[in-house]
Amino acid sequence: MISKYVKEQKRYTQDELRKIFECNTDETVQIIRKLKEYGIVKNVKKSDRQSMLSDLVEEDVRVTDIESGERELYYVFLFVGVIVVYGRVLKCYPKYINSSDNPITQMKQILRVLGKYNSKEQVIKLYNESDDGGSFNLLAVMLYLLQDYYDNGIYTNDVGVIETNGTGEILWDKTINETFSYISNNRPYYTELQTKKRVSDEYDFIRRLHACILTKFSKELEESDLPELFNIVTVELSEEQLDDLGDDDYILYRIQNELNVQYNTRKQLVIKAMYAYMAQKASFNNIDSFSIYGTNSFNLVWEKVCAQNFGNVLDSKLSELPLGVCDDYKDNGDSTLIEIIDRPVWHRTSGDISDGKSDTLRPDLISIYECGGSGEYCFGIYDAKYYNIDFHKSTSEYRIIGQPGVGDVTKQYLYHLAYDDFITKQGYKYVQNMFFCPDEAGDKEYGWVQMDMLHQIGEKKLENVAVVKLCASEMYSLYLKNHIVSENEMDKYIPVIGRREVDSQNFANRMMSYLTRIKTASKLAEKKLEMKSDRGKLIYPKQIKRELGAKIIYDAICPVASNAFYGFNPYKKEDYGSMVAEDMGDSYNRCSQIADASIEIEKIIKDLSEAELKDEKVLKVVLKKCIESKADIKSMAVGRSLDMLTDKIMELIRDVYL
């Protein structure tokens, strides 16, 4: 058989396909028509622009007739997997593979991925559906029966065998009636016992048929160069031919009789597969034979791989997420992340009629992970895009090719917007917005896409969409092993620079956001406050306050910071006429650094002795050290601001720590 590789979404001319198929022009046209019938091949009009590109642009697809010798068309495979058509095996490899024209290693792995995906999604069928009915998928049946054989062995039917003095069940009636006994002390003794056991019937018709079909399949697969690709071992179990078992009608009759009396599920499936094969009399070499193993929606496979590998929590309840549920979302604790996205509400003017249950945005993948054991979490909004993005140099400029459309980019911004309120109120420190694209080598810092009109919407600053190229073979390996990327492994695949710290809408809101973050880190202390005990020991209020110290320190620093940088105290009623205008970036950084300084101050205070805690000079050194190391708030480490902070923190220490 002729066995060749073809590349997904590569443009082929009719002459190129004729050479690949190794046939004349008329036969080439027949094969192309068959492939078009099943949506595996599409044809596009030639153009100067297309001749430069390596990927199919969807809007360039044209529905045209195929004529012998057609010179104005390109033919594009929209399929990943294996096709057997008119005695030819076509191995279609993914569009992102450029290192080899015969990528057998990559294809072996991809077929295993398809097998796992198919076990749940059923994308590979025993019958191929088409406009004019259905055709038998011989390749899928071959692989199913061979895999079943290696999992369960040859089809067997047991028969009962009666033995003399065997190891099976004793047949007392037969023993008493058909053997001699010896009488001693009025008791009979039998030297020969009739026993019964069940053994496999080596000459069972269905068993012989099963062995014959498996042997025939193995020979056809060897001729087609497929066993290595599917990583299967062929078998030779029988020297019989199908004709030795009877004509087709007789074999089908025997199979039907066996199916009528067989109630084992596995055996029923095997019998049905053999019946379908005998009814079709299919062969790879038949002129009308057409078999496929794969999918023309490989993008769905890529989405599944990424979702599993990065621990998709889109369908998880809010109460199950790492940071729990804040007060604003307490009523939604049993809702999932997908359910809290706003839905469009349709209204009819007359009759006060509305419907708010229509479909809404649905991201591919949401991943929430801790950043380096810091207690701070990143909210990742990821979209698995099966695109081969590249920059093509044309004369003196570069042009992007193979990229997602503007609708995909717009939706990715909207995903961030949809979760912006939740991210801020829950206290997530970082947010990521990314496209995950497959690549042979991988490049976690490949690039990004930006739309200015969506990057900044009012006071909301949305994250630009980073483009991350993941090593496809590594992703498939993780998928096949059911391995979820751990928090410590994230930086291996995702750029740290892709994390942007969360912006609140204004300074006061940012203060509350970071206050929430510190509060979240003190959940254990708050739980103790409710329980009033810890392993049998009484927990005093002062002990609880110490565990909540970072939050209290933060709350004390914020008014001083407001006065120092913005000319007002948000906790007092004042005239705000002298307030300075707020800079979004500075405000955000200051809030973040105040939160970090609060945590550092608390840690140092806990290690100080009582004498040191009473010494204002010692405390001033601690405050100066923790604050002056933060670039955006270091001005608070000198002068009146430092004196005010020292007074505030000394007051806290006297109340809480002494």
Image: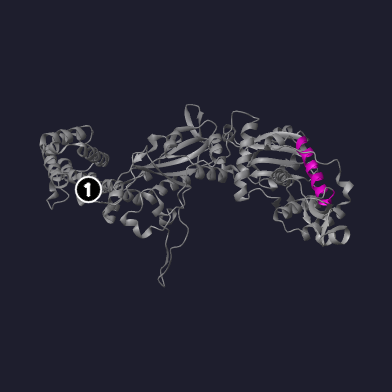
Determine which residue is flagged by label 1. Answer: 543
Look at the image and tell me whether residue 308 can be seen: yes
Q: Residue at x 29, y 55 (%)?
A: 531
Residue situated in front as seen by the camera: 162 or 540? 162
Left-right relation of 20 to 7? right
Residue 190 placement (x, y as % from top left): 83, 56
- Label 1 Cα neighbours within 10 Å, binned few <14 / some 14-19 / many ≥20: some
Classified by dominant secondary structure, the portion drawn in magenta counts as helix
Residue found farthest to the bottom: 351
Left-right relation of 277 to 570? right
Residue situated in front as seen by the camera: 562 or 314? 314
Residue 656 placement (x, y as % from top left): 17, 46
Look at the image and tell me whether residue 67 can be seen: no
Residue 47 placement (x, y as % from top left): 60, 36
Query: Is residue 25 on the magenta stretch?
Result: no
Q: Which stretch is magenta?
A: 203-223
- Quarter of the image with the C terminus in it: top left
For the residue marked with disc 1, what is the amino acid? Gln
Q: Which residue is drawn at 25% across and 49% down?
A: 512
